[in-house]
């Protein structure tokens, strides 16, 4: 997994995809396992990717991911990932250059949640502090 708050560029043909995909796979798996996301439409879509012939895994290559999801470039992959509920609180993913769809950059904002965090949410005051901090983080980065 990459360092927190450090941008990393990813392309379809680079070694960086071999780190990026397992990272995003882990976050998606974790977020979709939370009780709050049990009926989210993306959960069924993600499950279908994993259950198809030669299904999606954390170690899938770019070529396999492209064929399983039915995408053509890394920007399409980014758009698929961003459909996962809550992912933007943990990962910031965007085009590295707005003119091209062949390179993205991402940043791990915070570690993936655990089931205990979901079943024991913070108090109202702690949640308000957390929300203000996350908003400030997005504005300053």
Image (cartoon, rainbow, N blue to C red):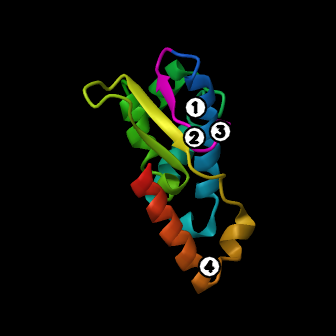
Q: Do the numbered discs 3 and 4 sit on residues whose CB atoms are within 8 Å?
A: no
Mark 1 or 4, which is nearer the eye?
4
Q: Is the magenta stretch mostly helix, strand or loop?
A: loop
Q: Residue at x 62, y 38 (%)?
A: 23
Q: Which residue is drawn at 37% across and 32% down?
A: 75
Identify the disc placed on residue 126: 4
Residue beneath label 3, please? 3
Q: What element carries label 4?
A: helix
Q: Do the numbered discs 1 and 2 sit on residues whose CB atoms are within 8 Å?
A: yes
Q: Do the numbered discs 3 and 1 sit on residues whose CB atoms are within 8 Å?
A: no
Question: Which of pointers 4 and 2 lies earlier in the amino acid sequence?
Answer: 2
Q: Residue 125 location in percent, x, y?
A: 59, 84
Q: 10 Å neighbourhood of mark 3: few (<14), some, or many (≥20)?
A: few
Q: What stretch is highlighted in magenta?
A: 1-13
Residue beneath label 1, please? 20
Q: Do the numbered discs 1 and 4 sit on residues whose CB atoms are within 8 Å?
A: no
Does residue 56 appear in this view?
no
Does residue 10 appear in this view?
yes
In this figure, what is the number of numbered marks? 4
Mark 2 or 3, which is nearer the eye?
3
Q: Is mark 2 on a helix, strand or loop?
A: helix
Q: Residue 6 location in percent, x, y?
A: 56, 38
Alpha carbon separation for disc pair 2 and 3: 14 Å
Identify the disc placed on residue 24: 2
Q: Residue at x 53, y 41 (%)?
A: 107
Q: Is residue 41 above or below residue 21?
A: below
Q: Is residue 29 above or below residue 69?
A: below
Question: Which of pointers 3 and 1 lies earlier in the amino acid sequence?
Answer: 3
């Amino acid at each position: 997994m990459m360092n927190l708050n450090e941008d990393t560029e990813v392309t379809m043909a680079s070694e960086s995809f071999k780190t990026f995909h397992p990272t995003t796979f882990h976050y998606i798996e974790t977020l979709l396992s939370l009780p709050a996301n049990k009926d989210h439409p993306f959960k069924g879509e993600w499950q279908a990717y994993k259950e198809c012939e030669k299904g999606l895994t954390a170690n899938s290559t770019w070529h396999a991911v492209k064929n399983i999801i039915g995408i053509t470039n890394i920007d399409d992959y980014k758009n698929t990932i961003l459909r996962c509920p809550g992912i933007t609180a943990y990962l910031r993913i965007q085009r590295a250059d707005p003119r091209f769809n062949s390179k993205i950059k991402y940043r791990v904002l915070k570690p993936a949640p655990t089931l205990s965090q979901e079943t024991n949410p913070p108090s109202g005051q702690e949640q308000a502090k957390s929300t203000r901090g996350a908003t400030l983080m997005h504005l300053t980065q």
